[in-house]
């Protein structure tokens, strides 16, 4: 008797479990995708549609809002600044972060584990706390309101991730490959450039894009440390209360796009970073 | 000419003593096998010779030149790794030619040598492929070809066959031995597989707990093990041991039997290989516990005086569990060990 009841009950619970599972997946996807979809609709609509109500569910593919955005005074120079700062951040964080990642993966040294933790702790300091002394220091050294000064701050923010991602990349390359190169006539340096570098280049690219996006999306330091040479985020923040709705949507869209591209580019390596790689 | 001399080499990892007091000379063109269980230090010794690890103490000489301060590339060696270490971003051709390109040899010379060694290893059809498109056995061939293409004085191999399946391993064993004999290089080969060691080596160095216990020809290591460890490690099944007490005048009491032995007054261990036992009228009384017919032979596990004892007997014999056999050891094959030092006693 009991066996019969369990036989009937088991598929039922399993089916119910499946519904809950599917519902949860749909809900989570909607949580992420619906705002993005609205952003897309409003960006690709004419300014009139953006400011009217109700809004359409299918984009008009009108480039009016984006056109207005491009023509708005100061936007293009802010966009240029954003790209410059993010580009510099990308280069500096890889140049500093990748050797650190290599050292963490290949060498044993005292305090290695502590270093891995500490490097994440650099993100634990709230930026508002550091902003004032940083601004004072930048003004004294003449770094304030410069692209280079801001990219220094962004590099600091991006380095922990650059180190940890490249650490996981280097750890994924068997040491034997390097050793084989050494026995075949390579020095440490040539083994690196001829064997390791070609193998991790895709991952390094992903890590660089990540650094780019961190800088691209950063608003607080950008707002505090620049006045004339605003980045796009700082510029939009500054004009938040005065700018029309369609400008905000278009600006938001332009800010979101690189982040989306990044997630697709580096998802594999982010997983690897947390030790659940299945490459 | 590349004779290798290892003088007083020791290696410590922190407080762990991986190698102690290693002294070994490997003749030019000799095929030396370092044999031992995992963790015995054989790979560490190979890596010290290669220059991938630095010795805590001691010297390494290759071809009359002291090399322990030199990086791997300046030692005139080539190495084959356990996991092959075939570069995944290069074709088979570029893998084999990698070392030659590093030496900046002209293109036609690289091509000539790559094609020659690829032919030698029967991989000339695969030169355009990447390592991801190769089977384990093919990668293994690429790794060996890559080392041979360097035309090194010394070729070092770290368990190169251990990742292959049994059949392929047997095939590669013979092939590798042939290719290496032809190349006139000195070879050092690390393995934990005694069959590989016995079948390939000119000389075997048996290692145990960071020391070389015995370095001798395969048959010498098999017939006259220098220590109990070697006797128990080499041979499948390994040697049998029984305690022996002196009965005076070079006579010894072993499991109630009187046998001839060395003239000593302290207790010894009596040792005999399972295949050196014959059923006879007088001998050791053995209670049969397990009978395993192996086709050519009969492997009989029995108990002699409470101790585990194995005999390899003719497969024509009818032996059943519970039988009591009388096994006579072949007198010239009996060996004796001192239980204090575990070393062989003449």
Image (cartoon, grey):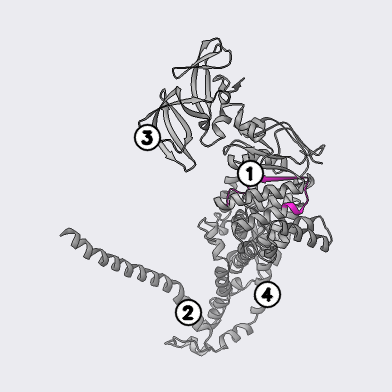
**Residue closest to the eye, A52 or A138:** A52
Q: Residues within 10 Å of mark 3 (few under 14, many from 20)?
A: some
Within the magenta stretch, is there residue A139? Answer: no
Output the chain of dot 4: A
Q: Is residue B156 visible?
A: yes
Mark 1 highlights which residue?
Answer: A108
From mark 1 to mark 2, how far is it between C-alphas? 48 Å
Q: CA distance from mark 4 to mark 2?
A: 26 Å
Task: Determine the residue positioned at 57% across, 59% down.
Answer: A127
Look at the image and give the residue range highlighted in magenta: B147-164
At which x and y percent is residue B176? 67, 49
Q: Are marks 4 and 3 on the same chain?
A: no
| Quadrant housing the C terminus of chain B | top right
Mark number displayed over residue B137: none
Q: Are marks 3 and 1 in contact (CB under 8 Å)?
A: no
Query: Furthest-left residue in view?
Result: A1
Q: Nearer the viewer, mark 4 or mark 2?
A: 2
Find disc 2 in the rendering and name its residue: A37
């Amino acid at each position: 008797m009991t066996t019969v009841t369990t036989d009937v009950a088991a598929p039922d619970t399993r089916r119910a479990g499946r519904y809950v599972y599917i519902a949860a997946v749909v809900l989570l996807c909607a949580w992420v995708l619906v705002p993005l979809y609205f952003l897309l609709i409003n960006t690709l609509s004419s300014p009139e549609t953006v400011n009217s109500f109700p809004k359409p569910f299918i984009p008009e593919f009108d480039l009016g809002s984006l056109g207005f955005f491009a023509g708005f005074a100061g936007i293009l120079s802010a966009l240029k600044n954003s790209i410059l700062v993010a580009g510099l951040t990308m280069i500096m964080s890889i140049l500093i972060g990748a050797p650190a990642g290599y050292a963490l993966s290949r060498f044993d040294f005292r305090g290695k584990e502590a270093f891995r933790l500490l490097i994440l702790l650099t993100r634990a300091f709230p930026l508002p706390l550091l902003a004032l002394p940083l601004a004072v220091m930048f003004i004294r050294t003449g770094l304030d309101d410069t692209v280079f000064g801001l990219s220094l701050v962004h590099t600091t923010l991006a380095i922990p991730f650059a180190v940890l991602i490249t650490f996981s990349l280097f750890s994924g390359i068997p040491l034997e490959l390097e050793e084989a190169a050494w026995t075949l006539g390579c020095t440490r340096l040539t083994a690196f450039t001829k064997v390791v570098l070609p193998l991790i280049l895709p991952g390094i690219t992903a890590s660089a894009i990540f650094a780019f996006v961190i800088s691209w999306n950063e608003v607080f330091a950008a707002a505090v440390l620049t006045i004339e040479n605003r980045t796009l985020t700082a510029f939009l923040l500054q004009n938040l209360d005065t700018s029309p709705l369609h400008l905000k949507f278009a600006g938001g869209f332009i800010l979101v796009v690189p982040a989306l591209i990044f997630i697709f580019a580096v998802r594999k390596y982010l997983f690897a970073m947390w030790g659940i790689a299945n490459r | 000419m590349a004779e290798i001399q290892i003088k007083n080499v020791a290696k410590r990892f922190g407080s762990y003593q991986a190698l102690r007091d290693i002294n070994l000379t490997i003749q030019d063109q000799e095929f030396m096998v370092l044999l031992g269980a995992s963790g015995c230090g054989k790979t560490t010794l190979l890596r010290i010779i290669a220059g991938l690890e630095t010795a805590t103490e001691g010297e390494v000489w290759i071809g009359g030149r002291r090399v322990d301060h030199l990086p791997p590339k300046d030692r005139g060696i080539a190495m084959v790794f356990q996991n092959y270490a075939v570069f995944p971003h290069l074709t088979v051709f570029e893998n084999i030619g990698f070392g030659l390109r590093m030496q900046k040899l002209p293109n036609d010379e690289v091509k000539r040598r790559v094609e020659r060694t690829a032919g030698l290893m029967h991989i000339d059809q695969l030169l355009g492929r990447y390592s991801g498109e190769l089977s384990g056995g093919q990668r293994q061939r690429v790794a060996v070809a890559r080392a041979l293409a360097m035309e090194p004085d010394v070729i070092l191999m770290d368990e190169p066959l251990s990742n292959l399946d049994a059949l392929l391993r047997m095939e590669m064993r013979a092939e590798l031995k042939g290719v290496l004999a032809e190349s006139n290089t000195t070879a050092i080969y690390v393995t934990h597989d005694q069959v590989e060691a016995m079948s390939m080596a000119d000389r075997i160095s048996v290692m145990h707990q960071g020391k070389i216990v015995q370095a001798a020809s395969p048959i010498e290591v098999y017939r006259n093990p220098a220590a109990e460890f070697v006797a128990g490690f080499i041979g499948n099944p390994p040697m049998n041991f029984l305690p022996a007490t002196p009965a005076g005048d070079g006579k010894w009491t072993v499991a109630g039997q009187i046998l001839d032995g060395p003239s000593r007054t302290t207790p010894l261990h009596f040792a005999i290989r399972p295949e050196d036992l014959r059923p006879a009228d007088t001998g050791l009384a053995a209670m049969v516990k397990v009978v395993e017919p192996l086709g050519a032979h009969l492997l009989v596990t029995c108990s002699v005086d409470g101790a585990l004892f194995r005999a390899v007997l003719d497969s024509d014999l009818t032996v059943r569990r519970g039988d009591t056999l009388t096994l006579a050891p072949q007198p010239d094959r009996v060996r004796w060990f001192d239980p204090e030092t575990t070393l062989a006693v003449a």
